[in-house]
Image (cartoon, rainbow, N blue to C red):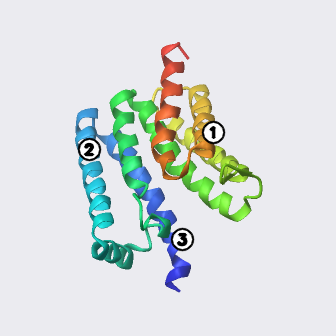
Amino acid sequence: MANTLNKPIRYLWHLLGGLLLPTIYYFTDRRISLIIFGAFFIFSFLVDLLRLHYPRLNEWVFRHLGMIIKEEERERFSGNPYYLSGAFLSVLLFEKGIALASLCFVACGDLAASIVGKRYGRMRIKGKSLEGGLGSLLACLLIGIVLLVLRLKLSFGILFIGAWAASLVELFSPGRKDNLTIPLFSGLIMQTIRSMGG
């Protein structure tokens, strides 16, 4: 029964954890968010580093937190430090609305790609599925519509292109690194368009 519940709980953890950081930034300012995200990154990095160097700690983590961590991460860094570093750099480099959008894209798009890809994936591209990429695109477009309601001073055109950029990066980025590349690349594309008057 526990194994049956693992994936839904992991998906829920991924979604809520992924949306926590943009929620924090939405209600605070850049300086406070950078401090919080930086602290989260240091903590996450140290936890991964310690568990990889101490097998007994690693075993304890997987015994008690197995529902929210992937088995393939047992002998390597999890996706958390990648996501947290991507969040920190997005807040540091981009204007607020664009940083929020890029973080929401990775939280929702990456999860949608995983769910759709594992269930319907047939056409493979570098270990990922085209169907998962389309799931990511749909999720990013939907979150873009939600972001329009929040009045972040972003046009639908910028969010539309950012959603496409995030989905393409998700499709072609290797493994856990998409937690870093998605927000940075989609944010860079949106910031460039904004600077051009888009």
Left or right? Give the position of 127 relative to 59: right
Mark 1 or mark 3, whichever is nearer to me: 1
Instruction: Tell me the amino acid under the disc marked 3.
Output: Lys
Left or right? Give the position of 156 relative to 21: right
What's the CA distance linking mark 2 and mark 1? 27 Å
Which labelled disc corresponds to residue 76?
none
Point out the tag, 1 or 3, that comes first from the N-terminus: 3
Q: Which quarter of the rendering shows the C terminus?
A: top right
The quadrant in which residue 167 appears is top right
Which residue lies most toward the top here? Answer: 196
Instruction: Tell me the amino acid under the disc marked 1.
Output: Leu
Residue 124 place in picture, x, y as percent: 73, 53
Left or right? Give the position of 158 relative to 151: right
On the image, numbered disc 3 is attached to which residue? 7
Q: Secondary structure at mark 1?
A: helix
User: Pointer 1: residues within 10 angstroms few (<14), some, or many (20+)?
Assistant: some
Q: Residue at x 52, y 78 (%)?
A: 5
Residue 170 place in picture, x, y as percent: 58, 45
Which labelled disc corresponds to residue 168?
1
Instruction: Tell me if residue 114 comes above or below residue 38 in the rendering.
Output: below
On the image, numbered disc 2 is attached to which residue? 38
